[in-house]
Image (cartoon, grey):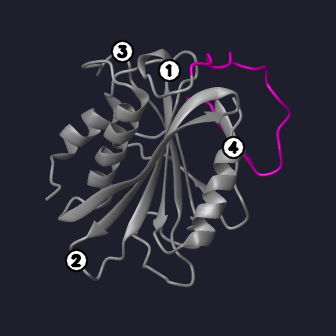
Amino acid sequence: MRRAALAVTVAALIGVGACGPGDDKDAKAEPSATPSTTHPARPGEIRDQKAHVSYVLPQGWYAKPPDTVVGLYSSVASTVDPKTVNPTAKPTADPNNPLGTFMVGVVDTEVFVAKSRSMPEMAETVGRAQLELIYPAKAQDTVRSSEAARLDGRNAWLMDIECTPEDKNVPPFRLRVTVIDTGTVPIYMLSSAPSSAGERFREIESIERSVRF
């Protein structure tokens, strides 16, 4: 059973310890790239001023205001049009239009640091904390893949976690977690969609490939 108080979850999510690629023997040894100069805006580009990153949303995806109550994310996007749907209402599952989400956050390394963690440990800590927020009930979480990656010249760690709720009325969903060593403060990207929504994950991968610093 995955149950935890929201405050504990929030602390786990934004309080994971910072580390560089040298702290993880399995990560690539190349140093992360230094911040680049400002590039011209691309069509459909979202610029996250807090995380100092930009990305391009595919057609059918919409930027949403970050949650001002909990304040976990610096930018948020989903496949729900905020102009046509009450943004405070939970969207109804539609097999013909599966929900996809993409969020960016900054690891707080000054206030909540408890200990240093390798990039895989950081990715799993962030991911499992997010799963508590999405579905804080009985479920089986399985790490599908965990691997070093490079994102716009920076070291990163990508982890896919499959969540199968005990409630048979709730379909399995997959959470993609990417932790990025920016050279200063790490950032994370979280995306999710129903496990069967292959097209959504292709769109999510296109967003990840579009990331620029």
Rounded to the nearest angstrom, the CA distance separating label 1 from label 2 is 39 Å
Residue type (three-letter) at the residue carrying disc 2: Asp
Q: Nearer the viewer, mark 3 or mark 2?
A: 2
Residue linked to disc 3 = 110
Q: Where is residue 29 in the image (x, y as percent from the top left)?
A: 57, 19
Q: How far apart are marks 3 and 2 (CA)?
A: 39 Å
Q: What stretch is highlighted in magenta?
A: 29-52
Which residue is tagged 2?
A: 167
Number of residues whose C-alpha sits closer than 10 Å to that of mark 3, classed few (under 14), some (14–19) or many (20 or more): few
Q: Say left or right for 91 vs 30.
A: left
- For mark 4, give the secondary structure: strand
The dominant secondary structure in magenta is: loop
Q: Position of residue 55 (x, y in %)?
A: 69, 43
Tell me what residue is drawn at x 27 percent, y 35 percent. 12
Mark before the other along the chain sequence, 3 or 4: 4
Circle 4: residue type: Tyr
**In this rendering, is residue 109 above or below 180?**
above
Amino acid type shown at disc 1: Pro
Above or below 142: residue 38: above
- Spatial separation of the CA atoms under disc 3 and disc 4: 26 Å
